[in-house]
Amino acid sequence: MDAADFLNVEGRQIVNGAGQPVALRGFGLGGWMNMENFITGYPANEEAQREAVGEVLGEDLYERFFDAFLEHFFTEGDARFIQSLGLNLLRLPVNYRHFEDDARPFEIKEEGFKHLDRVVGLCAAHGIYTIIDLHALPGYQNQHWHSDNPGHKALLWRHKHFQDRTVNIWEHIAARYRGNPWVAGYNPINEPADPTEELIMPFYRRLYDAIRAVDPDHLIFLEGNRYSVDFHMFGEPWPDVVYTNHDYALPGFADGGPYPGVSRGEYVDRDALEKTFLKRSEYMLEHDVPVWVGEFGPVYPPDDPGSHAMRRELLRDQLEIYARHGANWAIWTYKDIGLQGVVHAAPDSPWVERVRPIVEKKARLGVDAWGGTDAKIRHVMEPLERLFAEEYPDHKPFPFGTQREIELLVRNILLAEPMLREYAELFRGLDGTEIDDLMRSFRFENCTRRGELASILAEHAAQEGVRN
């Protein structure tokens, strides 16, 4: 493939340089260059984890710790495995902190591209496109921990300073990859959540123009507001833009309930799945442009193995719906420590053994928002929920209402942050060799695969004729 063979948009399809349709279907590499608590086992948000580990290990071993993690989490074995499934896409979520320090804004760090370059190259060598996704932006683009937000305010939308820094980062990313056709394109903001609904489109226009001034060739993937589901403020489509939703199904969550059946107060079956997908895709379908489902997929709680078959059936139905409507997709997530990834660190691996006490404590306290429940702390949560219902009956905080905000503030912040020191102490006294041995738990050859999940994805790739 040469530099003239960039992907572009043609009606409802993504096509290659020869005008042939390309179905982009694969994984998101969650938890890698943007770390997430359920994926590797730490509490709270990435920056807080890094600070706690740094205090215990010191500067040199801190660098060794996180660099070894990045090195071993994705290697050629992973690229070969994705290729063997017949899939052709890896979405690469990244945290702005790799490219810029808060104390030195606008100064781009060359070393931040080291592993991104490596994985883009590995994927290209195995016929896999990559999408570079800025998953955590300066100032935080949404209200939750997965944007590395330690609080619950999305300050990106309030401060031009953070917006200017984001533009600067994207100008440098676009300049670096503008000649690489195996980079399918750029996903400038993961799960934006602009409470005003008035700022997102002007900022998208600014980002679009800045990227296009540097790189006129790559696709740009724009997500809807309110965590990639709301497009009502979008106008006419822009050239070579792929619009993307996130399509998580209620029964796929740890507390989601049966499928088919009542989940969080709603009856969900295959028809309900399709109705939700069509609503989230309404903008794309009305404007006759491609649909890319940038995230979806159920979790597989280790303490509830009896639900796994039901969850795989949910996934099959979603994939069938996407196939019938010609949607591109990237399932969340590729690798973790056993909740959702098609590949996960082995239960008896050095890493999982070491972090198990924290993982168990997080489960007991309902700390993780993703894949966890508050079943064992209902005696704490119920009085708060009742109090808010009585005292603030009209309180409807953006983006998901009162109960979700209580969960965030109590479970994911108040109960999570005190656990950070306990987590970091797990690594006190380790030397460089011991750190490397720990991180090798994430190497593909040392991991466990979910065979049935892999087979489902491979079957759909074969049926749908994924083309490079």
Image (cartoon, grey):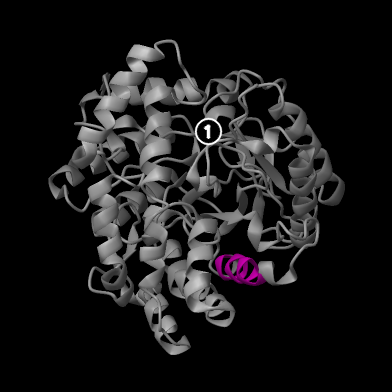
**In which quadrant is the C terminus drawn?**
bottom right
Residue at the (72%, 21%) spot, across then down = 236
Residue 91 appears left or right of 27: right
Instruction: Please state which of residues 435 and 209 is positioned toward the viewer in this rendering.
Output: 435
Q: Would residue 435 appear left or right of 204 to someone viewing this image?
A: left
Indicate yes or no whether the magenta region holds residue 120. Answer: yes
**Location of residue 98 by image quarter:** bottom right
Circle 1: residue type: Tyr
Residue drawn at point x = 48 percent, y = 61 percent: 49
Which residue is the site of mark 1? 227
State the image quarter where residue 317 is shown.
top left
In the displayed structure, does residue 92 sit left or right of residue 296? right
| Residue 248 to residue 210: above or below | above
Q: Position of residue 29 (x, y in %)?
A: 48, 57
Range of residues picked out in magenta? 114-123
Left/right placement of residue 125 relative to residue 343 reads right
Residue 230 at least partly seen: yes
What residue occupies the far top of the structure in this picture?
Answer: 394
Q: Is 199 placed above or below 332 here? A: above
Q: At 35% from the left edge and 35% from the top edge, which residue is drawn?
A: 318
Crowding at dot 1, Cα within 10 Å, few <14 / some 14-19 / many 20+, comes out as many
Residue at 26 percent across and 40 percent down: it is 373
